[in-house]
Image (tube, rainbow, N blue to C red):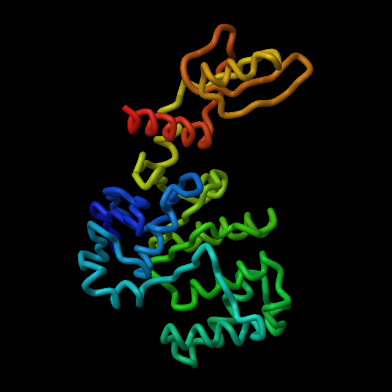
Amino acid sequence: MRLTIEGVGKVYKGGHVALADFSLDVGPGVLGLLGPNGAGKSTLMRILATITRPTSGRVLWDGADVARSPAALRASLGYLPQDFGVYPNLSAIEFLDYLAAVKGVPARRARPRIAELLALVNLTEAAHRPLGGYSGGMKQRVGIAQALLNDPRLLIVDEPTVGLDPEERVRFRNLLTDLAGDRIVLLSTHIVSDVEAAATSIALIDHGRLVDHAPPEALLAALDGKVWEHVVASDELAAAKERWLVTGTFRRSDGVHLRIVGDAPPGAKPLPPSLEDAYLHRLAGGRMGAAA
């Protein structure tokens, strides 16, 4: 089971470049696709879900070109788009029953599978209520359930925790981890904590380009000895941000405590690196390289 992205580019009308020569090879596990809003994550997800065709390059699923033979990938695919819509007059059971039929799930399997998934996303008690009365977080959970209806080998979720409360967010992260053993899960997000909790590998994307691809441990190890705490007065904060890469600020009675990535400022104390430090450091490095 392998998903291979080879030199994929996407240029929209008007010349906007959403992706540029993007290449990645993905096996079983949770791949966190991490990048700022507008980086090209959703475009890549739509291409992988066979909704949008790339302008250049190709996507291979187990060695077969998806553009030429999309059926094999679609049969193995579960997809939760960023903008997931529901039919407001249908209940969760009716909606999932309809989508199960669309996906070709046999009726004898659909009902027990729907009951199982509604329990998994904690919606059993609301299963017969019209979706129009659901909160945003509840609708998102229905979206997660529909993506799992056909027990996909490739699961693509685009900004899946938007609208979820903290408890639901933790539940969903744990669910992704449980699902990843024998399938490929692509988690696209701009929220570092979601990736940190679930991903076995991370791909950093910015301005449509792959900045880095590595396990979380490798990204953290690259910053050993490069993260510092430094205290400045409030009126020195702007100058400090121009001089150093500041990944966090905390105001205390003795001044502003800065979290800095790079060379040690005078009198700074070392800190263990976080994934957010690594993310911001690699994005800053990638942008400097692109500018050069």
Q: In the image, is 203 to the left or to the right of 117?
A: left
Q: Is residue 97 above or below residue 30?
A: below
Which residue is pictured at 36% across the width and 39% down the height? Answer: 211
Picture quadrant of residue 167 = bottom right
- Considering the image in quadrants, where does the C terminus appear? top left
Q: Residue furthest bottom?
A: 108
Q: Is residue 107 above or below residue 73?
A: below
Residue 16 rendering spot, x and y as whole percentages: 37, 52
- Considering the image in quadrants, where does the N terminus appear? bottom left
Picture quadrant of residue 125 = bottom right
Residue 285 rendering spot, x and y as whole percentages: 39, 29
Residue 12 rendering spot, x and y as whole percentages: 35, 58
Which residue is pictured at 26% across the width and 61% down the height? Answer: 59
Q: In the image, is 18 to the left or to the right of 268?
A: left
Observer-nearest of 30 and 192? 192
Q: Residue furthest right?
A: 253
Observer-nearest of 7 and 199? 7
Observer-nearest of 173 and 236? 236
Q: In the image, is 109 to the left or to the right of 127?
A: left
Residue 13 rendering spot, x and y as whole percentages: 35, 59
Q: Exactly how many numbered labels are in the figure? A: 0
Which residue is pictured at 61% across the width and 15% down the height? Answer: 230
Q: In the image, is 260 to the left or to the right of 75?
A: right
Which residue is pictured at 51% across the width and 24% down the height? Answer: 245
